[in-house]
Image: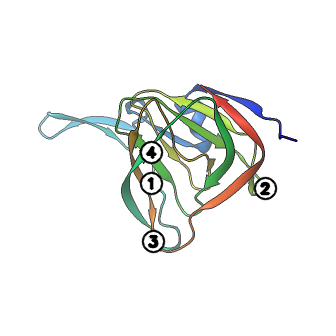
Amino acid sequence: MSTPVKLLRAVPLTADAFRPFGEVIETDNASEIRLINKGTTTRFHDIAPVDVSSEGGRPLISIFRGKPFTLPVTITMLERHPLGSQAFVPLSPRPYLVVVAHDEDGRPGAPLAFLAADGQGVSYARSTWHHPLIALGDVSDFLVVDRGGAGDNLQEFDLPEPFALEA
């Protein structure tokens, strides 16, 4: 007997809708905008916090290369990072999917899905349940800022029911 699959539809990623889970990384989210380098560069300042200092953590920068998924994507698990935030900034001009869930007594609640547009990144707040990277269309690179150092900063949870994610 197969497990029924629930339908999950992605909505456009906006700063307001995503705020319970972290920050959208885009120029509209800057706390301050100013010209630097003798007027040749615009700085969009303080777009998203980096929260990695718990238990002696340190910031690290990586590049993740995501293989594209074909829709619908079956969502069977979520993960979170209890010791720090994790930011994804796309290096390719392609949309991608973001799946998150509220915490319900140490377990993820019902997932929500967002379709990130070109130029939008996300920074998951510490302990935010989310699905691993879901690239669309083609292999896509992401600049990732997260926590390095000692400690177990990964928790995974297998969902009791799978979800079929459509954009």
Other-residue count near label 4 (Cα within 10 Å), few / some / many at <14 / 14–19 / ≥20: many
Residue pointed to by mark 2: 105
Residue 77 x, y percent position in the rendering = 68, 49
Q: Earlier in the sequence, mark 3 or mark 1?
A: 1
Q: Nearer the viewer, mark 4 or mark 2?
A: 4
- Report the amino acid beneath label 3: Gly
Q: Where residue 9 appears, x then y in whole percent?
A: 67, 26
Per the image, label 3 sits on a secondary structure element best described as: loop
**Quadrant of the image occupied by residue 138:** top left
Badge 3 or badge 2: first in the primary sequence: 2
Q: Nearer the viewer's eye, disc 4 or disc 1?
A: 4
Q: Residues within 10 Å of mark 1 (few under 14, many from 20)?
A: many
Of labels 1 and 2, the one closer to you:
2
Pointer 4 or 2: first along the chain: 4
Q: Mark 1 falls on what kind of element?
A: loop
Expressed as whole percent of the image width and height from the top left, the position of residue 157 reads 70, 55
- The tag earlier along the polypeptide, 1 or 2, is 1
Q: CA distance from mark 1 to mark 2?
A: 25 Å
**Residue visible at 36% across and 29% down in the picture:** 93
Label 2 element class: loop
Which residue was labeled with disc 1?
A: 50
